[in-house]
């Protein structure tokens, strides 16, 4: 029996799809969430301070390559309202925050985006609303940022105002699991039992499986656990790969063999380092908070150090080969985004390899990666790109001798590449057939 009328009111509004929702931050997490909530028949204000994004959405277009414009139009014909006006929070029952949580140059949490949003929310937040954070951050973040606001406004949490946390699980380009298919299981949590009830009710509208954590900190920690698990396993296989190369063992064959074990083994693959918005970043959020509790997370740090060293190791191997063989011709880097079939260059280890090689060798370096999105191209102004067409133009390739596979996009024709280059350094096990000219790096 729900005796709290505010709680009852919010639950009722969610159940009848009458709740008005503000989603703040329209990136690869917030935008799909807006579309999913709109599809679930809610009125959704998509709030972002980037006017270009708002204009694009109002024109029914998408600025995220993995989100088709038809989905924007579908939502615009329903109750999706893109805006840069934070005052719409006043007209909302639910406020969900999906802004970036990067690290700074000292690998410490950079909470400026969350801080900016909180400074807006505190102007407008009022009784009968729930605030839900989706950003990946250290355990304690949600309460740290919102309890003081509610206290100042004399809002009793769980009675007048509600607070929850549900980590984002959007994996850009993952066509199998996405909130838009309502098959992305969601971890949810509330500051109190009544908060929890509201968060659960809401996410059941856009997810096929909702897992309730006993408190917000556990849910915040869960997200870090998921991605630190990846970071340390990638660090492990990168270290093992260095051992295998010395022992002339094919790491990838050993991985295929180990995968035959039907339990207790998940395969991770050696690569040129870790990129993207999650894996290179999330471990440092936990390290930061653990150190506040007097714990130095040596193992987590070591894995990140191993991963961070990979671009340098690869650059040095290529440089050493060029100098030893006195190669004068141009070098081609194939794939510069942070992972296979991604258009995203954020934190890409391949850009670090390009940077290091440019300092270490005189050979001209070109990049071929047709997937890089326009925001990525803006950040890579100093890089000489060639088109995919040129990649198969033998006359043009005459000036090249070496190619390095950074991201093994499906779009590349690996048979042609194996034929057209004298030496290929491959960081992704891109070729089916082995050959002397292909050097696993
Ligand atoms: N990488 C390796 N070896 C591997 C796996 C990845 O070197 O075996 C590299 C990739 O090339 C990339 C980086 O690590 O540079 C990160 O790759 P990722 O597969 O972890 O992809 P992300 O960064 O897009 O991680 C996201 C995460 N999703 C969210 O945080 C919402 C992660 O939780 C997902 O598990 C992952 O996608 C996924 O499964 O695709």
Image: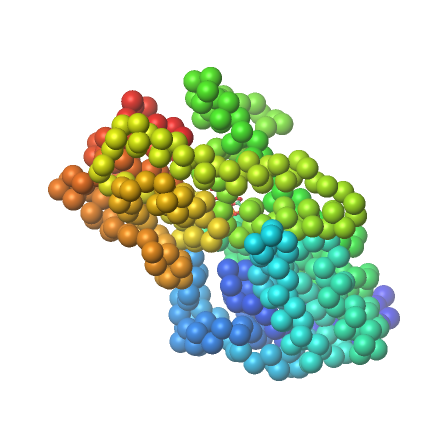
Q: Position of residue 52 (x, y in %)?
A: 43, 74
Coloring basis for residues: rainbow
Q: 436 or 62, which is in the foreground?
A: 436
Asked which quadrant contains residue 438, the reply is top left
**Outermost top residue:** 247
Residue at point 24% right, 51% down? 387
- Rendering coords of residue 206 (x, y %): 60, 60
Quadrant of residue 127 in the image? bottom right
Residue 153 left/right relative to 109: right
Instruction: Give the position of the N terminus as an image quadrant.
Output: bottom right
Residue depicted at x 45% and y 26%: 252
Give the number of callouts: 0
User: Is residue 81 in view from this perspective?
Assistant: no
Query: Picture coordinates of residue 371 (x, y %)?
Result: 35, 52
Outermost residue to the left = 395
Task: Indicate the position of residue 22 as horizontal and vertical percent values.
Answer: 61, 73
Question: Can residue 437 be seen from the camera position used here?
Answer: yes
Q: Residue at x 43, y 46 (%)?
A: 352
Q: Quadrant of residue 391?
A: top left
Front one among 337 and 110: 110
Residue occupying image coordinates x 18% and y 40%: 399
* Residue 394, above or below 162: above
Residue 208's place in the image compared with 5, above or below, is above
For the C terminus, which image quadrant?
A: top left
Question: Taking 302 as reference, is 311 left or right?
Answer: left
Front residue of 119 and 90 = 119
Q: Is residue 1 left or right of residue 285?
A: right
Residue toward you, 56 or 405: 405
């Amino acid at each position: 029996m729900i005796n709290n009328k505010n709680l009852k009111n919010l639950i009722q509004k969610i159940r009848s799809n009458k709740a008005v929702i503000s989603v703040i931050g329209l990136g690869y997490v917030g935008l799909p969430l807006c579309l999913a909530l709109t599809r679930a028949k809610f009125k959704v204000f998509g709030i972002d301070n980037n006017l270009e994004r708002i204009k694009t959405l109002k024109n029914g277009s998408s600025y995220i390559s993995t989100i088709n414009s038809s989905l924007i139009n579908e939502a615009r014909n329903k109750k999706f309202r893109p805006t840069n006006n934070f005052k719409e929070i006043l007209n909302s029952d639910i406020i969900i925050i999906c802004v970036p949580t990067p690290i700074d140059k000292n690998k410490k949490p950079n909470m400026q985006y969350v801080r900016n949003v909180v400074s807006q929310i505190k102007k407008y937040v009022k009784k009968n609303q729930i605030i839900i954070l989706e950003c990946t951050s250290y355990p304690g973040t949600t309460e740290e940022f919102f309890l003081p606001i509610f206290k100042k406004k004399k809002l009793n949490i769980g009675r007048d105002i509600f607070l929850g946390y549900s980590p984002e699980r959007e994996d850009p380009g993952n066509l199998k699991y996405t909130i838009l298919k309502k098959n992305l299981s969601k971890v949810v949590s509330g500051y109190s039992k009544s908060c929890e009830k509201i968060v659960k009710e809401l996410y059941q509208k856009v997810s096929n499986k909702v897992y309730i954590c006993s408190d917000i900190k556990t849910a915040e920690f869960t997200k870090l656990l998921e991605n630190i698990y990846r970071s340390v396993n990638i660090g492990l296989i990168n270290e093992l790969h260095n051992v295998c190369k010395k022992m002339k063992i094919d790491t990838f064959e050993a991985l295929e063999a180990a995968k035959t074990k039907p339990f207790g083994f998940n395969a991770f693959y050696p690569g040129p380092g870790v990129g993207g918005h999650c894996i290179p970043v999330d471990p440092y959020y936990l390290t930061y908070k653990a150190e506040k509790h007097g714990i130095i997370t040596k193992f987590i740090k070591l894995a990140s150090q191993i991963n961070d060293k990979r671009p340098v190791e690869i650059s040095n191997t290529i440089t050493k080969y060029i100098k030893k063989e006195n190669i004068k011709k141009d070098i081609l880097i194939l794939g510069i985004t942070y992972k296979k079939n991604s258009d995203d260059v954020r934190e890409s280890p391949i850009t670090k390899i390009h940077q290091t090689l440019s300092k270490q060798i005189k050979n001209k370096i070109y990049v071929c990666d047709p997937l890089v999105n326009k925001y990525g191209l803006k950040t890579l102004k100093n890089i000489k790109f060639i088109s995919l067409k040129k990649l198969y133009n033998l006359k043009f390739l005459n000036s090249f001798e070496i190619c390095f596979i950074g991201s093994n996009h499906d779009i590349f024709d690996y048979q042609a590449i194996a034929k057209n280059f004298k030496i290929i350094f491959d960081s992704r096990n891109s070729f089916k057939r082995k050959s002397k000219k292909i050097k696993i790096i």
